[in-house]
Image: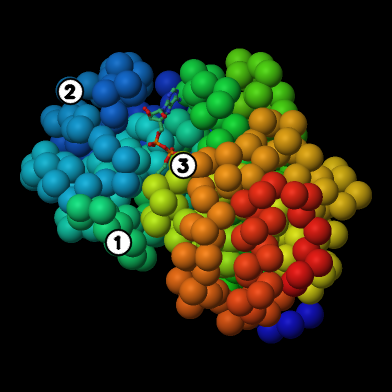
């Protein structure tokens, strides 16, 4: 047992089918809120209004101009809409939660979040804002939602493909939590259970998006994934995906889903305990093989080249990734090792980790 430091994050969670309809009013009342800014994207506005019906007279402003990655002008419009508010209530995916966080960042207003995807942003103190093509992120406890209402029923409409992508993104948060910089026994335990719930729900949802039990598994898994990620931070996998995504505008979730087994294969030889726990949570003999097969079953593209990435693109970003690689990654990140990892992830050959 090695020494560790663990900063627990505060926050109240209400979880269960139907709770957004039955319990949201009590959660809003707990803040004594009288002037609520409702933030929900256009597709989620009808649902959000329905959930707010019992306290509609207290929703004094609505903002629906959500855009991915929270452009600064969107943040500024949402902040203007919050001028008179005493609470921000957001209903939607990570982009919606991110917009609520942008408001909290400058106003200090408390957030009640009702997530409708598996992004996990609602349990992290991380904010992100985009100016032009440049995304800036930061950490501030003021943006951490004070209450999260998780209702699996709200995710029944999330299409299968989006559910799989979002769920695998949560899987990446869990796996990476085992070697991320602020890992500790609590975040590892949370991540392990997150993997278990995600692995149970994902194959079911891929074929039957209306399975309530699998939806509950996935949402619980997403909550655990976000919690582990929030505490442990991000490691090599997230650095690789961040650089690749930023340089070549690759689809976020698919990039994560393709790269994850290769980073796991790279690290597993030097993180055997983590690999054993990940395998057990996946219900497989071998973590790398199990994760690779799960991705295959869920229709994840075989390699980054299927996303349109060229072989020379891999060489172009090698130094950028190397510069960001965490010093305490389980397997030392050398130029040759990283190149082998990226080339394998690009071509889609079976992840072996032989070059770690
Ligand atoms: P998103 O919020 O952009 O939503 C994707 C799409 O799904 C949208 O078109 C939305 O209208 C639709 N949608 C949402 N819920 C639905 C439902 N229940 N039924 C049908 N359609 C629904 O995507 P996301 O994956 O939830 O979030 C991604 C964003 O979150 C990224 O910007 C990412 O950087 C951010 N994020 C931030 C953190 C953090 O800690 N700050 C963590 C994870 C993700």
Say whether mark 1 is within 8 Å of ligand 1: no
Q: Is residue 140 left or right of residue 78?
A: right
Quadrant location, the C terminus: bottom right
* SS class, disc 1: strand
Instruction: Report x, y in % for residue 259.
Output: 62, 52
In the figure, residue 100 lies in which quadrant? top left
Checking the image for residue 57, the label placed there is: 2
| Residue at x 45% of width, y 61% of height | 243
* Label 3, label 1: how far apart the Cα atoms are: 18 Å
Residue 249, placed above or below residue 189: above
Q: Earlier in the sequence, mark 1 or mark 2?
A: 2
Q: Earlier in the sequence, mark 2 or mark 3?
A: 2
Which of discs 2 and 3 lies nearer the camera? The answer is 3
Can residue 222 be seen in this snapshot?
no
* Label 1, label 2: how far apart the Cα atoms are: 36 Å
Instruction: Report x, y in % for residue 229.
Output: 55, 58
* SS class, disc 3: loop
Q: How is the image coloured?
A: rainbow
Can residue 76 be seen in this snapshot?
yes
* Label 2, label 3: how far apart the Cα atoms are: 40 Å
Which of discs 1 and 2 lies nearer the camera? The answer is 1
Asked whether the beta carbons under mark 3 and mark 1 sit within 8 Å of each other, the answer is no
Instruction: Report x, y in % for residue 130.
Output: 25, 53
| Residue at x 40% of width, y 36% of height | 93
Q: Which residue is mark 1?
A: 136
Quadrant location, the N terminus: bottom right
| Residue at x 66% of width, y 16% of height | 208
Q: Which residue is mark 3?
A: 251
Instruction: Report x, y in % for residue 155.
Output: 51, 25
Q: Is residue 136 left or right of residue 211?
A: left
């Amino acid at each position: 047992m090695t020494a560790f430091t663990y900063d627990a994050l505060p926050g109240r969670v209400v979880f269960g089918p139907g709770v957004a309809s039955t319990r949201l009013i009590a959660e809003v009342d707990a803040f004594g809120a009288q002037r609520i800014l409702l933030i929900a994207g256009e597709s989620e506005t009808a649902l959000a209004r329905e959930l707010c019906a019992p306290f509609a007279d207290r929703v004094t402003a609505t903002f629906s101009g959500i855009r991915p990655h929270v452009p600064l002008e969107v943040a500024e419009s949402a902040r203007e809409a919050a001028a008179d508010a005493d609470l921000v209530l957001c209903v939607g995916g990570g982009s919606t939660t991110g917009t609520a966080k942008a408001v909290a960042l400058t106003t200090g207003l408390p957030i009640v979040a009702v997530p409708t995807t598996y992004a996990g942003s609602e349990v992290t103190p991380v904010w992100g804002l985009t100016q032009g093509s440049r995304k800036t992120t930061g950490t501030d406890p003021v943006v951490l939602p004070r209450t999260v209402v998780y209702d699996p029923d709200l995710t029944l409409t999330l299409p299968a493909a989006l559910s799989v992508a979002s769920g695998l993104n949560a899987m990446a948060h869990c796996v990476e939590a085992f070697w991320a910089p602020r890992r500790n026994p609590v975040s590892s335990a949370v991540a392990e259970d997150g993997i278990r719930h995600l692995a149970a729900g994902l194959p079911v949802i891929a074929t039957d998006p209306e399975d309530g039990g699998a939806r509950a598994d996935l949402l619980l898994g997403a909550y655990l994934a976000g919690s582990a990620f929030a505490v442990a931070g991000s490691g090599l996998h997230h650095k690789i995906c961040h650089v690749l995504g930023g340089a070549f505008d690759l689809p976020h979730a698919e990039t994560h889903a393709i790269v994850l087994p290769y980073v796991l294969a790279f690290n597993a030889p030097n993180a055997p305990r983590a690999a054993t726990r990940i395998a057990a949570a996946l219900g497989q003999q071998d973590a790398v093989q199990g994760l690779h097969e799960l991705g295959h079953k869920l229709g994840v593209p075989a390699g980054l080249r299927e996303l349109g990435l060229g072989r020379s693109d891999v060489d172009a970003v090698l130094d950028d990734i190397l510069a960001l690689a965490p010093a305490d990654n389980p397997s030392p990140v050398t130029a040759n090792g990283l190149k082998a990892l990226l080339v394998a992830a690009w071509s889609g050959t079976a992840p072996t980790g032989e070059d770690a």
